[in-house]
Amino acid sequence: MTQKRATPTIKRRRVGGQLRRWRGTLKSGEAAKLMGWDTTRLSRIERGTYRVSGEEVRSFCDKLGVVDPAGVEEVARVAEEPMGEGWWAPYTGRIGQNYLDFIELEADAQSLQIQHPVIIPGLLQTPGYVREMITRAPTAVSPPHAEMLVAVRLARQAVLSKVTRLHALVPESALHAKFESGPALMRDQIRKLLDASEMPNVELQLIPLTAHPTYGSNGAITTLSFKHPWAKVASVDNPMGGSHTDDLKQVGFLEKEFSAIAEIALPADESRDLLHAYLEGPYK
């Protein structure tokens, strides 16, 4: 049967990446021979440009001697998933591929850590705040495209009710933003933060105004954890849709960065008290 080449979707790249991790130090040529493949085919499978079936995943792992039945079944399951599914599918080609990949990873995550040094993180933004951030950006896009981006960001927030844990670090300075539409926008935003902080799976900490500016100076960070056996992923935001990695050392570095910021942030209960104080004070 002729092997069909596939678009390297993020899931197929992750399937290939996990097979590469299971291959370990075994040379690619030797591993390919176990399945009667040539080295080029194995290389393309590991890069996600060739589709591998669930049965091939099971057979390959068996020949490699992988002792992880649950992990193998999970990878085989994902290998069989059809392409182009998910609420984000209609946006393919309309938003950047890096952003689409991140959305898909975010939707599959079991736990998330999010931090932004300047603004309210996207998963916690109200519709009014989202629209303000997108339509007033220096690189503002056309109104129809802006509304599409607003819809995408709001749709992403469905993960709040799905993840087992969301740990969010929010800069107190973001609460001082002034908008032409008036203080009602920020009042609604603070209420949303308070509502989120009351969710049993959410830990929300404010980074106080007194924090040294070095904390968070390296930009927005998101780390994502998944069910076994998938590797953790870390993402750094930027205007082009961000970049993400599952490299163990890079993820570890960004997790350490997040933990350091969390250490100097206000505890969750004090953060809620401060949010209430803002509602009763300048945004009353």
Image (cartoon, rainbow, N blue to C red):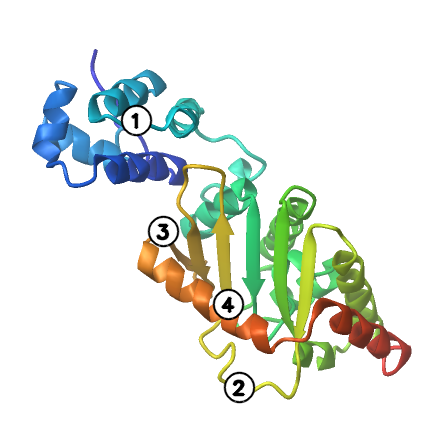
Decide if residue 243 is on the left or right side of residue 181: left
Furthest-front residue in this view: 67
Residue kind at label 2, given as amino acid type: Pro
Query: What is the crowding at mark 1: few (fewer than 14 residues within 10 Å), some, or many (at least 20)?
Result: many
Give the Cα distance between marks 1 and 3: 20 Å
Mark drawn on residue 246 = 3
Which residue is label 1 attached to?
51
Which residue is label 2 attached to?
213
Q: Earlier in the sequence, mark 3 or mark 2?
A: 2
Query: Height in image: 56 above or below 178?
Result: above
Quadrant location of residue 117?
bottom right
Give the Cα distance between marks 4 and 3: 16 Å
* Nearest to the observer: residue 1 or residue 277: 277
Residue kind at label 1, given as amino acid type: Arg
Q: SS of the residue at dot 1? A: loop
**Which of label 4 and label 3 is nearer to you?**
4
Mark drawn on residue 258 = 4
